[in-house]
Image (tube, helix red, strand yellow):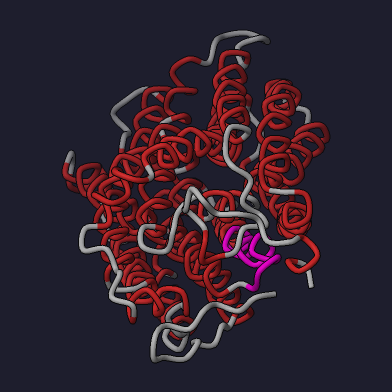
Amino acid sequence: MNPTPAPPGGTVPERTPRKAALASFVGSMLEYYDFFIYGAAAGLVFPQVFFPENDPATGTLLSLATFGVAYVARPLGAVVIGHFGDVLGRKKMLVLTLLLMGVSTFAIGLIPSYAVIGVAAPILLVLMRVLQGLSAAGEQSGANSMTLEHAPEGRRGFFTSFTLQGTQAGLILANLVFLPIALLPEDQLLSWGWRIPFFLSAVVVAVGYWVRRSLPETPEFERVEQEHTVAKLPVAVLFRDHWAAVLRVVLCALVSVVSTIVGTWSLAHGTNVVGMERSTLLWMVIAANVVAIGTLPLWAILSDRIGRRPVFAFGALGSAVAVFPFLWALQQGNVGLVFLFGILLSGVTYSAANGIWPSLYGEMFDTRVRYSGMAIGTQIGFALGGFSPAIAAGIVGEGPNGWLPVAYLTAGAAVIAGLCALTARETAHIPLEQLGRPDATPRDRQLTHA
């Protein structure tokens, strides 16, 4: 394995792959705990708290629309945070995104209900949700860039998968916190119970800052900095030299529709329409993501050996198939089959794509624009997918086959993502310092895995 070349007159900064992976895992877990508790609340509580004047179906639709608002803010956050991440470094932006997410989430817990302050309540809710979106826009891209640039050659897929393991752990933590809350009597749940998970974001800020404060900047970014080749306007360089990669990331990121349908829409539909217990569906999401924490690194290790494209494509196209039995089981209210197909879809199949995208996307760009490229590409794609729960609530039909339009929506997005990944260049065995260059050549496979 060839080391990162030293800058002129300098030494090679030390890589700390394990520390970077741990910081990405913990930071993403805590940050996405904040993000996912909103998704759970939007499906289970917010229709009654912030939109009580509407009928239940309209209230649910409006609540899920506020969930999607964050995805509208994400592209803006990606441009701003991505710019400074490529100019000032990865570490500074990761601390900023953590603080912004923690403060905005805590503030949601303070918002009075519609019954107390009227229309100001949903307006404040949307404002805080926008701030959450700005934060989330830079979180994963920064953590992925940090981990990828610290990772040893031949194992970038494995180490970057820890960011997504952290995201899944955050979802598990959010649902575990909501489980006892969901069992409260209706009046207590809607008055004060739902606020507790949001207040716990104060812990998120403290723990996340403690984990990330001592992590060094990546050696690859420091090398670019010492060589004075940091892009003054990364976005301009990005769209001049890497526009095709950005477009490819946007389309591949549509696979996130699978996650939002399973983790948000299915909770609302299963509870409010099918009549399943809140706790049952929360346990299904928890079980699927516990399995995902185990499968994510395995898919990532496989991608380090056989390449990113086939693993991602399998995850996306396989999810397009697996979503049909899951949504059918949900419509039937069959608890056993909901668990079986939910775990197969979200915990196993989707994880193949979910665990690979940090390395697949990050390796499309060079160091000067990696943060911006990943942030902008993913967040535009996520923005398109973020409204999928609201779209699903609008197109779901009546009767036993009413779930089919939602299945077609989800499968269509996953198919686009999978086919798009197959058009990408294989980068698993290209050296870090050559990534994003048209003349890059794969390092000998034997040396890569030495």
Which residue occupies 70% across, 38% down? 315
Which residue occupies 76% across, 24% down? 325
What segment is highlighted magenta in the picture?
A: 152-166
Which of 309/339 is in front? 309
Q: Quadrant of the N terminus?
A: bottom right
The answer to whether residue 165 is magenta is yes
User: Could one spot residue 197 in this view of the protein?
Assistant: yes
Above-or-below relation of 27 to 43: below
Which of 251/199 is in front? 251
Which residue occupies 48% across, 15% down? 395
User: Could one spot residue 48 in this view of the protein?
Assistant: no
- Residue 5 lies left or right of residue 349; in this view the side is left
> Can you give x and y, in whole percent of width and height, for residue 94 in the image?
38, 70
> Can you give x and y, in whole percent of width and height, for residue 20 in the image?
55, 77
Tell me which corner region of the image, top left, top right, bottom left or bottom right, holds residue 115: top left
Above-or-below relation of 75 to 314: below
Q: Quadrant of the C terminus?
A: bottom right
> Can you give x and y, in whole percent of width and height, for residue 275 in the image?
63, 28
Which of 145/380 is in front? 145
- Residue 158 lies left or right of residue 102; in this view the side is right
- Residue 69 lies left or right of residue 393; in this view the side is left
The total number of labels drawn is: 0
Above-or-below relation of 267 to 411: below
Secondary structure mostly taken by the magenta-highlighted segment of the chain: helix
Which of 337/236 is in front? 236
